[in-house]
Image: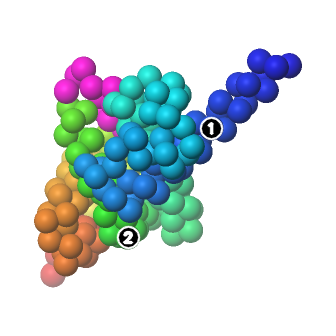
């Protein structure tokens, strides 16, 4: 009984750490958030905090996963409400403008994760594969239902949307007046525009 109770407490503490990390990073940004600050925010020492994750890199990889879970839930809710996978994608990007620290976190960690030795490398690569595959499946269904041009390539289009979103987020960090959602909407209108 004690082991099960200890395990449940450990899982709860880990979730508390991740939720707190998301709030602190959203407020301060990735580069301005230290392990010491996160540890203090959850009432642990730095070593106590890292006990739950193993290293700073593992901690931030887990925070990225947690952020993605929240984005995926928002996208699924929007997709369920509208049936439009692109509108759901654009809505997530529009909401990102409300949390600049998390956009900065995503941008930095995405670049860091290109190193095959980074703790988030496999997750980040899989995240793009899953994200583009899910968007491509939605586009394919729309194309097959006659809602999109018959010659639309769903895989290329999904990859293009993810690439544009990532690039726009970096540009937005440099110029917060940039409307990321408007640019994605513009691309979508170009794609769906019929001749004439």
Mark 1: give few (<14), some (14-19) or many (20+) Cα within 10 Å: some
Q: Is 2 in front, or is 154?
A: 2
| First in residue order: circle 1 vs circle 2 | 1
Q: Is 70 in front, or is 126?
A: 70
Q: Is residue 121 magenta?
A: yes
Q: Quadrant location of residue 28?
A: bottom left
Q: Quadrant location of residue 183?
A: bottom left
Q: Residue at x 31, y 56 (%)?
A: 29
Q: Is residue 126 visible?
A: no
Residue matched to label 2:
98
Q: Is residue 52 magenta?
A: no
Q: Is residue 89 above or below residue 194?
A: above
Q: Is residue 191 above or below residue 179?
A: above
Could you say whether the residue bearing mark 1 is in a helix, strand or loop?
helix
Q: Residue at x 33, y 69 (%)?
A: 97
Q: Residue at x 27, y 26 (%)?
A: 118
Mark 2: give few (<14), some (14-19) or many (20+) Cα within 10 Å: few
Q: Quadrant of the C terminus?
A: bottom left
Q: Is residue 109 above or below residue 183?
A: above
Residue 84: image location, x then y, percent: 44, 64
Q: Is residue 25 visible?
A: yes
Q: Is 132 in front, or is 194?
A: 132
Tell me which segment is drawn in magenta: 115-127
Residue matched to label 1:
13
Please name which of the two marks, 1 or 2, marks the residue nearer to the observer.
1
């Amino acid at each position: 009984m004690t082991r099960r109770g200890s395990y449940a407490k450990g899982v709860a503490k880990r979730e508390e750490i991740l939720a707190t990390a998301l709030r602190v990073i959203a407020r301060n940004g990735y580069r301005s958030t230290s392990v010491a600050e996160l540890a203090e925010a959850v009432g642990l020492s730095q070593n106590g905090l890292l006990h739950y994750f193993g290293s700073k890199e593992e901690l931030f990889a887990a925070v990225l996963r947690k952020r993605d879970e929240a984005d995926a839930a928002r996208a699924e809710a929007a997709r369920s409400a509208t049936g439009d996978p692109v509108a759901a994608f654009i809505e997530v990007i529009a909401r990102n403008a409300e949390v600049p620290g998390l956009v900065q976190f995503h941008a930095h960690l995405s670049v860091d994760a290109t190193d095959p030795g980074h703790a988030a490398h496999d997750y980040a690569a899989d995240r793009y594969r899953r994200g583009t595959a899910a968007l491509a499946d939605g586009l394919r269904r729309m194309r097959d239902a006659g809602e999109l041009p018959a010659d639309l390539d769903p895989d290329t289009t999904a990859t293009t949307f993810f690439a544009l979103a990532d690039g726009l987020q970096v540009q937005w960090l440099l110029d917060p007046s940039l409307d990321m959602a408007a640019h994605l909407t513009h691309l979508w209108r170009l794609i769906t525009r019929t001749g004439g």
